[in-house]
Image (cartoon, coloured by chain):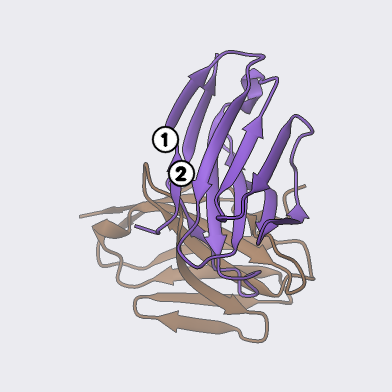
Chain colours: A purple, B brown
Amino acid sequence: DSGVTQTPKHLITATGQRVTLRCSPRSGDLSVYWYQQSLDQGLQFLIQYYNGEERAKGNILERFSAQQFPDLHSELNLSSLELGDSALYFCASSVGSSVTGELFFGEGSRLTVL
Amino acid sequence: DQQVKQNSPSLSVQEGRISILNCDYTNSMFDYFLWYKKYPAEGPTFLISISSIKDKNEDGRFTVFLNKSAKHLSLHIVPSQPGDSAVYFCAAKRNSGYALNFGKGTSLLVTP
């Protein structure tokens, strides 16, 4: 158990809809990262928050947005969903900006768009 | 643009033998390299890392080798055990950056 909690574990929705994925980082971790794993793809970095502020942005679509709340939990909002958005979405956390790169991952939220 | 590449999608090894997983990268600015292991229905877990100032790091049965001139790293597992069967992801980052760049993973199967 990494200490990172993601909900929901599974989500099935239709194209055009909007969903919210939730992540609670490990106790004491200030950084939250979101990654997307599509079929046959590696983990694609989406966005990072550190202590409530956006720190880095990767390949995140404009239809997607995220935020980190004062209690440090984070939400990833996916809107106008398309079939290609079906993927595993992982949240990870670290104490700081993780110079050495060691992140602690949750079990992921599997999104299926029909 | 895939900056971290794992060209072998799968690898099968007999129990007790050595497993060698390979990884290539294109960005010469990467300073840290990591290997993560992932079991089905679980998130990736950190396995071992190496800084660009080293060429080898060992932790028990796991050793990572880094060849900076070739932009290549490898993970050696000796001896391999059935419990090592998992997907292994290679990852890299810049010291000044925040995000890990992952490869697509190699699925390792260790057979009894």
- The answer for which chain carries disc 2 is A
**Tag 2: Cα neighbours inside 10 Å, few (<14), some, or many (≥20)?**
many
Taking A31 as reference, is B112 left or right? left
Taking A18 as reference, is A103 left or right? left
The image position of residue B17, as x and y in percent, is 30, 67
Q: Which mark, residue A9?
A: 1
Taking B75 as reference, is A80 left or right? right
Q: Do the residues labelled 2 and 1 touch (CB within 8 Å)?
A: yes
The residues tagged by marks 2 and 1 sit, at their Cα atoms, a distance apart of 7 Å
Q: What residue type is labelled 2?
A: Gln
Residue at 79% x, 70% y: name it: B28
Q: Which amino acid does label 1 sit on?
A: Lys
The image position of residue B46, as x and y in percent, is 46, 65
The quarter of the image holding the C terminus of chain B is: bottom left
Q: For residue A77, which quarter of the picture?
A: top right
Residue A44 to residue B92: above or below: above
Q: Which mark, residue B70?
A: none
State the residue position of label 2: A6
Residue at 67% x, 80% y: name it: B52
**Nearer the observer, B7 or A97:** A97
Toward the front, the furthest residue is A70
- The answer for which chain carries disc 1 is A
**Nearer the observer, A89 or A21:** A21
Secondary structure beneath dot 2 equals: strand
